[in-house]
Image (cartoon, rainbow, N blue to C red):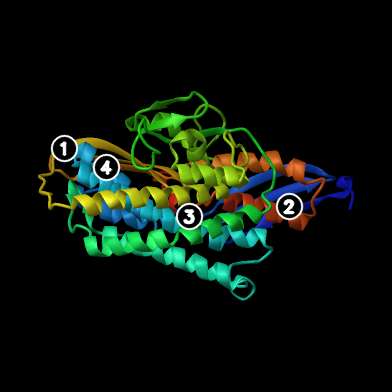
Amino acid sequence: MTNNAKTYTIDVHHVTRVEGHGNIRINTRDGVVEDVKLCIVEANRFFESFTRGMTPHEIPWVVGRICGICCVGHQLSATKAVEDAQGIAVSPQTVLLRKMLNESQFLQSHVLHVYFLAVPDFVGAPSVIPLIKTHPEVVKRALRLKKLANDYTEVMGGRTIHPMSNTLKGWRRLPDLERLEQVRNRLVAAVPDLLETVGIVKTLKIPGYERETEFVSLKHPDEYALYEGDVFSSDTQSGVPVRDYRSVTNEFTVAHSTTKWSRWHRDAYAVGALARVNNNFDQLHPEAKSVAETLGLKTPCYNPYMNNVAQVVEIVHCAYNSLAMMETVLNGGLREEDIGHTPKAGRGFGAVEVPRGILFHEYAFDEAGRCCDANAIIPTSQNVNNIEQDMKAFVPLMLPEMSQETLTLHMEMLLRAYDPCISCSVHMLNVEFVD
């Protein structure tokens, strides 16, 4: 078929191997792209409304239920926002334990996404299931790493999913040091699996499409920012405090999406692993920098398909950084802390990096200490605009050289590369559709 003869409609309904429901619609006529849309069709969640009337300590546990994958991140971001509203300062021990809990979630999520959701695209498999027969050692390795990360979360938070140990001012039940030492030893023993993971990803043929965009992430002067920092833009090379997050997200609606979209200094911006690596490369662990070099990830990188590579770089960073934090805890021990608190009025803001990007929470409390206002903006609602801009840029380039089936696959791969969590992204309270 010649380029001029390409007239068809691509309607992927729904894209598989992503969390939630999203559709891709592309119309071409006589070799000309007429329309490209990423349609988010997930129903609204209304979690912000659920929190109205709740006491401060209830909120982090409830909003963690927004997502079964990013439950740790939602809990931590909400905890920080509530503590900010209540004027609560936490100890260095609590900050350290929260950073460990957060990185356990990164390991869980990145291993899940790279091995089970992204790799099948690159080896021509419809899912990970066929790989059980064709690549059994790869699947076993993926399961070993996922189990290790799950156990790390359980030791730190009390449960693998929706952990309950973290609370306002500290920890309800401190991690068991004997079990933490076992996880530390297993993580040391997992280094060969990490190296094999790098080896596999190095063999993947990453599509070579690029589009310059703005990268947004947390940035901290002393560390690779996953738990705290200012909101940093690659465009301005400067940041703003988390409490000014609305000046970053600038949410707006479009007719074909039930999630709000975001933009800052240009039409769209990207968050997530590639944004973090681009903005904070110098603060990666040396072993992670070495992996980036091995995998050909040089900053600035504007290829969104390389987000999967950036996830592998962060797997290695979190593994080595976690080992260092575990040594600190095991050598210094832990002490019980006073977590008593009397609720009061106030408004607070919190943010952490979760695997898919920066996550904002905001809460206000009345004079009775009950929640009267809430807002949560998750990474996918910040990324959907950028993903569609990528699609609009890449489809005209792909159309002359790809069949309809191959172009469809590349659009699905692009969406999956961002590791979207679509269900979480739909948080609107007042929806007004414009036809």
Disc 1 crowd rating (10 Å Cα; few below 14, some 14-19, many 20+) is some
What is the quadrant of the C terminus in the image?
top right
Can residue 292 be seen at all in this image of the molecule?
Answer: yes
First-in-chain label (1 vs 2): 1
Quarter of the image for residue 229 reads: top left
In the depicted structure, whether residue 184 falls above or below residue 271: below
Q: What is the spatial separation of the Cα atoms under label 2 and label 3, in whole angstroms?
A: 26 Å
Secondary element under disc 4, as helix, strand or loop, is helix
Residue shown at 54% from the left, 58% from the top: 197
First-in-chain label (1 vs 4): 4
Judging by the rendered image, the residue that carries numbered circle 2 is 407
Judging by the rendered image, the residue that carries numbered circle 1 is 345
Disc 4 crowd rating (10 Å Cα; few below 14, some 14-19, many 20+) is many
Q: What is the spatial separation of the Cα atoms under label 2 and label 4, in whole angstroms?
A: 43 Å
Q: Check contact, mark 2 vs mark 3: CB within 8 A.
A: no
First-in-chain label (2 vs 3): 3
Q: Nearer the viewer, mark 1 or mark 4?
A: 4
Viewer-proximal residue among 199 and 337 = 199
